[in-house]
Image (tube, helix red, strand yellow):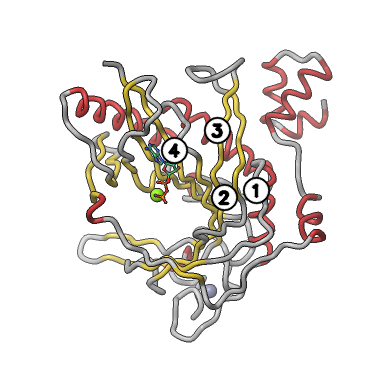
Amino acid sequence: MEYEAVIGLETHVQLKTQSKMWCGCANAFGSDPNTNVCPICLGMPGVLPVPNAEAIRLTALTGYLLNCEIPRFAKFDRKNYFYPDSAKNYQVTQYDKPSTANGWLEFEFDGPGSVDGMARVQITRAHLEEDVGKNSHFDRFSGVDFNRAGVPLLEIVSEPELNGPEMAYAYLRALTDVLFRGGISDCDMEKGMVRCDVNVSVRPKGSTKLGAKIEIKNMNSFSGVRRAAEYEIARQIEVVSQGGKLVQSTRRWDDVAGITEEMRTKEHAHDYRYFPEPDLMPMQPSDDWIAAVRTRLVELPLVRKQRLMRDYQLPAGDAEVFRSNVELGRYF
Ligand code: ADP
Ligand code: ZN
Ligand code: MG
């Protein structure tokens, strides 16, 4: 029997704001540990969050860049869990009423599932949440740096429509290109501004039913995503073709060994006890607010390339140069 892979990506991107999501601390990379912190992002009892207006605008702008609907009602929710990187013991995120939903991303891709060198993937939602701190493990102790805690983070969820590691890679490249060009995020991988959960399943070729979802957590490079997906697809096909059964589970990628390892199965899944964040008002964007956000829309890199080819009969190679080098493109 032949098998095919199904991949869905949850991509976390740090927003390009001056300050954090709920306080005035700097959203900056590379400061000394625990210097960009205050009682709010350290989760002290009794403090109250004040939402970052620019982060909410950038979320809606992302929605428009990704062809999403911007619902006229959205809210924040608490996702409860205990882990040292989150001093509050919950993360504020958006659960059932996200700020954007039902979009799509079209991107260049030459391979299975593409039409004329293009592919399209549905975007389930892009919602706003907060980043957590960073744990570091040393010889004899561990440390937590809360500089990153409370930095605005966008989670962009794709539908399970990517058909392999190459398509996932092309999608990620195109997504970050759009977000970078749109002024949403610097998307600097070296600084951990983009992180990805990779959901992988396999099924008999041609079947429409999804196989058991296996999630590889917290990938921080595109090539890592591609390698992890390649490994995981081969592993899953090996299991099912030998008559084994796959169960919904979470795995981690070991970049040095080049393998994925099981972290937990569905029976041990977290119960996050989501509930509406009582300290924050729901959001009801007005026409004026939406119009102001929309004035910040830019021409997408791919649209720009296609326009240059159409309007000036440029060969694809030349238009590609002007797509990636915006200044040179403007001069042209
Ligand atoms: P939740 O995080 O609430 O469990 P889902 O499991 O529906 O949400 O989706 C999380 C991500 O997993 C999405 O990107 C989705 O496309 C992907 N996904 C869901 N089911 C599968 C599957 N069977 N195979 C591959 N990816 C999947
Ligand atoms: Zn703070
Ligand atoms: Mg997930």
Mark 4 in CB contact with mark 2 (< 8 angstroms):
no
Mark 3 in CB contact with mark 1 (< 8 angstroms):
no
The residue type indicated by label 1 comes to Thr
Q: Residue at x 56, y 48 (%)?
A: 125
Mark 2 in CB contact with mark 3 (< 8 angstroms):
no
Percent x, y for residue 164?
41, 26
Q: CA distance from mark 2 to mark 1?
A: 8 Å
175 over 22 or under it: above or below: above
Left-right relation of 243 to 221: left
User: In this view of the protein, which residue sits in the foreground, 59 or 189?
Assistant: 59
- Secondary element under disc 4, as helix, strand or loop, is strand
Q: Which residue is identified by label 1?
A: 62
Looking at the image, is mark 4 or mark 1 nearer the viewer? 4
Q: Quadrant of residue 142?
A: bottom left
Q: CA distance from mark 4 to mark 1?
A: 19 Å
- Secondary element under disc 1, as helix, strand or loop, is helix
Percent x, y for residue 259?
25, 35
Q: Residue at x 22, y 54 (%)?
A: 267
- Count of numbered marks: 4
Percent x, y for residue 298?
76, 42
Mark 4 in CB contact with mark 3 (< 8 angstroms):
no
Q: Which residue is identified by label 2?
A: 126
Q: Residue at x 30, y 16 (%)?
A: 2
Q: Which residue is identified by label 4?
A: 8
Percent x, y for residue 22?
57, 71
Q: Which residue is identified by label 3?
A: 121
Distance from mark 4 CB to nearest ligand 1 atom below 8 Å: yes
